[in-house]
Image (spheres, helix red, strand yellow):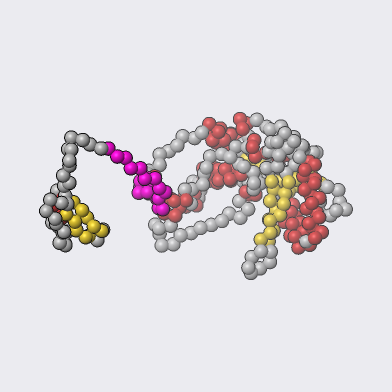
Amino acid sequence: GIQAFLDLIPGTPLQIKGEPSAMHTSLGWLVWGTIPAENPSHLDTALLANVGEPYEPQIDVILRSFWEQEEVSLPVPPSPDDAFCEKYFADTVSREESGRYVVRLPFHDGLVPKLGSTHSLALNRLFKLEKRFDKDTTFAHLYKENLRSYIDQGHLVPAKGSSPYIMTHHGVMKYPENGDPKMRVVFSPAERDPNGQTLNEYLLPGPKLQGDIGQIISRFRLHKVALTCDIKQMYREISLHPVDRRFQRILFRFSPNDPVQEWELTRVTFGIASAPYLALRTLRQLVQDEGSRYPLGSRA
């Protein structure tokens, strides 16, 4: 078959009678023909192993990645924890007279954790925070202003009694190119108690309810105009049941001359492991409860 193939390649081969022929191609010199063997019955076997690192992905890796992206995903049954989380939400969610939803924190197996005291840790963090207030008056003003907004909206109230587990908090400054700096107070439920446990380790994150990013991007191609929206203070629009608020306590005072006070966050708090699930699941509950009254809005 090699001779028929070579007839299709332009060029003049170099031929020597009784020897292999050769021809120069765009791929280099090509040699073909037969070599007379002195002892045709004797065969020598040789193995050549060439190990190297490819400088680009192999074709099978690229194809496998393509197939995985194009493969139609099948529904995955919920894990036992996700199933429990869903049932717990459905059994415990309620609404205030104003219509606002009230949710519970989904602990593992529904068991309330016995966290050790983090009061000393939270107190030391507060003292360090106050030292920064003394050095940076802008930071101090924005920090206190942010917490006052929590108090004014009823999202932060004086705690009744005391709780061993106290969350720490810190401020994150944002400096836009045009405009004044902005402050966001971040509460941390990831501080470890004397036993090495954290609040987030006891909480179930719940099933993933966020839309698939691939599907979201694809939907942008369906219409000429795409609309997006943002829910202001999304987590803080959902009340936390009073029984669970003791796990969302902080220490703070607005003046070093005041006694340190224990405060309680009354809404779902950013940073809590189950907060994304609780927020999105509450939106779905709203659609179930009110979707018939607002059919166009429920579709969004």
Q: Residue at x 76, y 56 (%)?
A: 144
Using the rendered image of the protein, determine whether residue 160 is visible from the camera's viewpoint. no
Judge whether 55 appears above or below 195 on screen.
below
Q: Residue at x 56, y 39 (%)?
A: 206
* 60 falls in the magenta region: yes
Q: Residue at x 49, y 35 (%)?
A: 78
Q: Main secondary structure of the magenta part?
A: loop
* 208 falls in the magenta region: no
Judge whether 146 appears above or below 239 on screen.
below
Q: Residue furthest front?
A: 38
Judge whether 39 appears above or below 238 on screen.
above
Q: Residue at x 71, y 46 (%)?
A: 265
Q: Which residues are magenta?
A: 45-64
Using the rendered image of the protein, determine whether residue 294 is visible from the camera's viewpoint. yes
Q: Please state if 57 lies on the left or on the right of 161 as rendered.
A: left
Q: Please state if 269 lies on the left or on the right of 225 as rendered.
A: right
> Residue 240, position in %: x, y?
66, 42
> Residue 231, position in %: x, y?
58, 54
Judging depth in this view, the residue of 183 and 153 nearest the camera is 183
